[in-house]
């Protein structure tokens, strides 16, 4: 999570750094919980355990993902499950988290004062994940407004044209929720759908992966392009080495998509390839390689 230099100059981070990135350390599900490190992009130095340093107490959950909107940073956390928020300027805790009806939260998107959070719910059958839903949150009152039931293990989420596009951990579909009615429809895909980005022409791209629960042929995974006007697949890029988490990101111009690759378990090698969105082509070689990358921003 990057905090740029045009933020108000009100904290130790704003006075000491021209630009910093927040690194979410997940911790151990059954042991130590999450913490946040602050990375100074210019000096390439890092300070760990900064949430505790600022607030005087530790986080009590494992942060699955974080989302920044305006001057606030929101956490989707597991064990204990909750939806929390802190200042994106100085990491100060804002209020008590929402825990009721927030079960296994995953990812978030926001539109003004409304947030939409994918939740797996209580899972008895991982091949169906039938109890999933999208939690709709009133950010002004910081309260749950309603739940949109969505079976299939809702994962990555994107908002466009008053519709939610949701990846599904247990289906080869993109779920589309029309927010004017909460009606649900699906876009069939060749792989398990994970995360979304939008290119400069307004087309959506979704990562398609193979998982241990749903192993798929290598020629069916990669990236699919979606036309949000027709909700149809209009392009496909095969990337056999895409990681099962399906992490994707774009450059500021939105003409290049970055996609993370990973060896199958127990391998630890990871890399990042580039996609030319207009040409619909994958770079021949990785431009970044390393070990055990987890997350892309």
Image: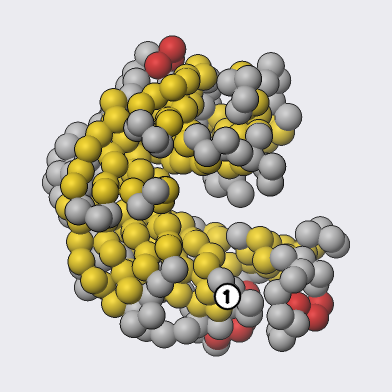
Q: Is residue 15 left or right of residue 75?
A: right
Q: Is residue 265 left or right of residue 213?
A: right
Say few, some or many: other residues with alpha carbon within 10 Å of mark 1 (under 14 / 14 to 19 / 20 or more): few
x 20%, y 61%: residue:
147
Quarter of the image for residue 97 reads: bottom left
Q: Is residue 244 above or below residue 89?
A: above
Quarter of the image for residue 91 reads: bottom right
Residue 164, image x and y in percent? 34, 48
Residue 248 or residue 97, whichever sits in front: 248
Q: Is residue 162 left or right of residue 292?
A: left
In the rendered view of the protein, which quadrant contains the N terminus? bottom right
Q: Is residue 59 above or below residue 26?
A: below
Quarter of the image for residue 61 reads: bottom left
Q: Which residue in the protein does label 1 denote?
A: 71
Residue 182 or residue 26, whichever sits in front: 182
- The residue sitting at the right extreme is 43
Residue 27 appears in the figure:
no
Q: Is residue 43 left or right of residue 11?
A: right
Q: Is residue 254 above or below residue 136?
A: above
x 35%, y 31%: residue:
230
x 44%, y 22%: residue:
234
Residue 264 or residue 44, whichever sits in front: 44
x 57%, y 75%: residue:
71
* Element at label 1: loop
């Amino acid at each position: 999570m990057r905090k740029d230099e045009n933020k108000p100059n009100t904290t130790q981070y704003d006075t000491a750094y021209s630009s910093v990135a927040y690194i979410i350390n997940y911790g151990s599900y059954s042991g130590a919980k999450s913490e946040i490190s602050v990375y100074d992009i210019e000096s390439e130095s890092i300070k760990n355990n900064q949430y505790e340093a600022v607030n005087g107490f530790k986080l009590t959950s494992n942060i699955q993902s974080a989302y920044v909107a305006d001057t606030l940073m929101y956490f989707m956390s597991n064990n204990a499950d909750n939806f929390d928020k802190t200042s994106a300027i100085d990491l100060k805790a804002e209020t008590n988290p929402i825990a009721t009806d927030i079960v296994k939260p995953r990812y978030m998107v926001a539109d003004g004062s409304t947030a939409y959070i994918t939740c797996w719910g209580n899972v008895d059958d991982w091949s169906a994940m039938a109890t999933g839903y999208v939690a709709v949150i009133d950010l002004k009152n910081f309260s749950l407004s309603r739940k949109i039931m969505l079976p299939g293990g809702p994962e990555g989420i994107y908002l466009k044209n008053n519709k939610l596009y949701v990846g599904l951990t247990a289906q080869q579909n993109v779920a589309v929720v029309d927010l004017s009615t909460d009606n649900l429809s699906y876009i069939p895909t060749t792989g398990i759908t994970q995360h979304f980005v939008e290119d400069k022409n307004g087309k959506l791209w979704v990562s398609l992966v193979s998982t241990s629960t749903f192993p798929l042929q290598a020629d069916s995974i990669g990236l699919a392009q979606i036309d949000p006007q027709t909700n149809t697949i209009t392009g496909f890029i095969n990337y056999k080495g895409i990681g099962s988490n399906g992490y994707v990101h774009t450059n500021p111009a939105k003409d290049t998509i970055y996609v993370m690759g990973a060896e199958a378990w127990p391998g630890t090698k990871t890399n990042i390839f580039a996609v030319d969105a207009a040409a619909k082509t994958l770079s021949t070689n990785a431009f970044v390689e390393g070990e055990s990358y987890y997350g892309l921003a």
